[in-house]
Image (cartoon, coloured by chain):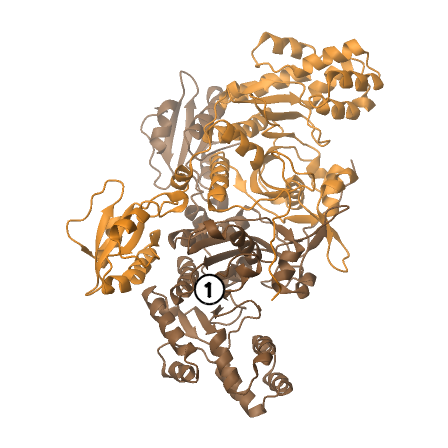
Chain colours: A orange, B brown
Amino acid sequence: MASQHSFQAPTGTRDFYPADLSRLRYVQDAWRKVSVRHGFDEIDGPSFEHLELYTAKSGEGIVSELFSFERAGGEKTYALRPEFTPTLARMYASKANSLPRPTKWFWQQNCFRAERPQRGRLREFFQWNCDIIGDESPRADAEIIAVAVDAFRELGMTSDMLKVRISHRGAVETLLRSRGVLPEQLPGWFFLLDRAGKISNDDFTAEAGKLGMPANVAVDLLRLMAMSTPFEAPTTQMMLSEDASGRGPAYFKALFAELKAAGVAEWCVLNLGIVRGLAYYTGMVFEIHDTAGKERAVAGGGRYDGLIELFGGPPTPAVGFGMGDPVLSLVLQEKGLMPTDAQVVDRLGLRPDAYVISNGTESADAAVGTLVGELRRAGLHVRRSYKATKNVGKLLQDAAKAGPGSRGARFAVIIESGEEGGRATVKTLDSGEQTAEPVRFAEVAARLK
Amino acid sequence: MASQHSFQAPTGTRDFYPADLSRLRYVQDAWRKVSVRHGFDEIDGPSFEHLELYTAKSGEGIVSELFSFERAGGEKTYALRPEFTPTLARMYASKANSLPRPTKWFWQQNCFRAERPQRGRLREFFQWNCDIIGDESPRADAEIIAVAVDAFRELGMTSDMLKVRISHRGAVETLLRSRGVLPEQLPGWFFLLDRAGKISNDDFTAEAGKLGMPANVAVDLLRLMAMSTPFEAPTTQMMLSEDASGRGPAYFKALFAELKAAGVAEWCVLNLGIVRGLAYYTGMVFEIHDTAGKERAVAGGGRYDGLIELFGGPPTPAVGFGMGDPVLSLVLQEKGLMPTDAQVVDRLGLRPDAYVISNGTESADAAVGTLVGELRRAGLHVRRSYKATKNVGKLLQDAAKAGPGSRGARFAVIIESGEEGGRATVKTLDSGEQTAEPVRFAEVAARLK
């Protein structure tokens, strides 16, 4: 064998030891529960796709952000998925005719981005998507926002901590057109608006000038874009009244009614500064931001009515969002909402039912494996001592922190004798109560249930 | 946007639509439950590692079986994991001093192999591993076999369907040495024995001849290697009596006692023909085979006491196994043990609690979103009709197949009026019973719980 090496995980990836993974599973469990109760069905696809699947959606510019590779001697180039939406669109397109309308799918797995890792941004991370395909109504838009919000509720967050900033490509377009922007300039403007929060106001005004907008109009636009206003606020009405085509006001009125019905209106604000850089959005777009503002968007999504068709399906409306685990976990930690290791163990149902120890006699020592085997076959989560010590007091201390995250077992089972079918004392660790007389091995499982 | 394409999933990968994914989740759920009740904690690591992590364990020969790639302009070469054990060994080695002894870890995620896809063998597949690190006893070996067997039990299999074929590198070594094989020839022999089932007896004898073994000895060896015998059978005693060093008999006696205690002895046979090609095994090795023999091994594993040290940790005994989803799923299907879609939905807890429909009046139509929102916020799994029809009879038929896998909802909730807080009839779909009078919206959640 080769000499010893010291190996590291690749930059931007994570090793999940049990406690780390439990916290991820806690978040994923909330995602899953909420998806299910909102009526979404889970799907999955390959971790890598033909490179063209990604360039068809996002253009050649995406290639530098991908981990791509070829099969040795390879005819094809593949790339690790940077997001799931292209796979979803491909899967929907190939079975469009046999799928229900609407189709409601969720997905939660890992994605890969070949970018420089930084706080909240990794090369491999987990993501949760929900999509409604085949429904063009504002109700579907509201349903997508409601399922995202419900996950935050499930994780203990309230509407003062996060805001769903909602916009609409059409409304922003009307706003820009009314300020002299030409139709062919719109893509450039969406790109610029998406960067507005990341560059200085002076840089924005300079960039706007290059696109032909006078500085005072650009400053005014910037102010409008920075505003987040509740849907019922007079300011919102004023902003929407600017929408000469009438598309914005009617849409937002219908959306807001649906958001109210779904019980999430107090989480939502209008913010026409949200444009989402991704070129494929066609209608409503939204981002969910920590109101403390320390992190980037916790989630984002919108309507993409052209994508299924692009991937070979019939023209099909669709709306969805994505939420990643790194930023969400940071936000939960900052707000003190990440449960302790022991709490996570309880929520995930990982607390051991029993911890089996021997009283130190030879027959009891020899019977540990048998009793553990019996109890596990009865469906119980059983751990045991592997120590050579015969100090029952010390072993009971071990039982009180026997599970993952040091969560103690519900019961200690102390084998008193392995003879004649075996006998054991069953001790409830939370209360200290124990059976007055040792019980037969055959009765232990029933006692624990 | 580009013109329409028709895209395909990469060769050897799978699209999991809801019913397909439910079947995978059913298997993974069994893996997880069994891991937890046997006291294993879950870990995870990166989907790709530095290429050297894999070549350090398996040599340069592995490279052609890997999907490897570089970061653009890249300093490092990475590879998608073909298995998890190198990551586990790296993770253990880097924290060896702070981890409990024994450490019991399980893992279930995806692996990648750049080989030609065939029945039961894919380029991306899911795998389940359990490992016990820091325990060199036969008890740990038995515990690893017991957790694997318990998963088959959980999935409805019995000991007549599968057999755990157990061997030991040391015992095979003794057997070979007694037939004149020299120590330096052992690696070549292990390689040849691993191929014994895949090549003809004549080819085997010819290969053995090249290694210096007379044909009659080789034929006798082959016969011995092909035998699977229960541990208590006289033949087993005879085979073990050949082990001049005594290592085999003592080990197998201890192992068998532990397998009996763990309640899995009837699943296990001795088969000295099991050698496992992987060079890093150091002691007990096993494979679990379908007794109908149609498929390759469903699972395999063994003891690898040198690997943690190879990856920079202290000398540490370890034993574990891996089980993939493709062969297992084929075996379940062949034996009629894969549950129906509706059964899977019940087992995974995915049956909808309620399906909400309107009685067709305007106020009821308008209240669907509100009631659905209330019930979901109460934690219930609620689906609704999206159809424009007002035919309540047809909508009730939809309710009876509203869930994934066409599993009907537990209750249909028919909104009778949206006025004055709303009223709805609650109908139990399995029995047909329904509330005598419509109940207030505020009471519906309690009725469903």
Q: Is residue A441 left or right of residue B245?
A: left
Q: Please, is residue B18 above or below residue A327 in the view?
A: below
Amino acid type of the residue tagged 1 in the rendering: Lys
Is label 1 in a helix, a strand or a loop? loop
Count of numbered circles in the view: 1
x then y, percent, for residue B58: 62, 64
The residue that mark 1 highlights is B335
A209 vs B62, nearest the viewer: B62
Q: Is residue A12 left or right of residue A376?
A: right
Q: Nearer the viewer, residue B445 or A442?
A: A442
Residue at 59%, 43% in the rendered image: A110
Q: Quadrant of the C terminus of chain B?
A: top left
* x and y percentages locating residue A50 in the rendered image: 72, 49
Q: Measured from the top left, where is residue B270 in percent x and y?
A: 43, 75
Q: Nearer the viewer, residue B20 or A86?
A: A86
Number of other residues with Cα within 10 Å of mark 1, as a class: few under 14, some 14 to 19, many 20 or more: few
Q: Residue at x 77, y 60 (%)?
A: A73
Q: Chain of mark 1?
A: B
* Image location of residue B92, percent across then percent down: 51, 53
Inspect this view and state whether residue B272 appears. no
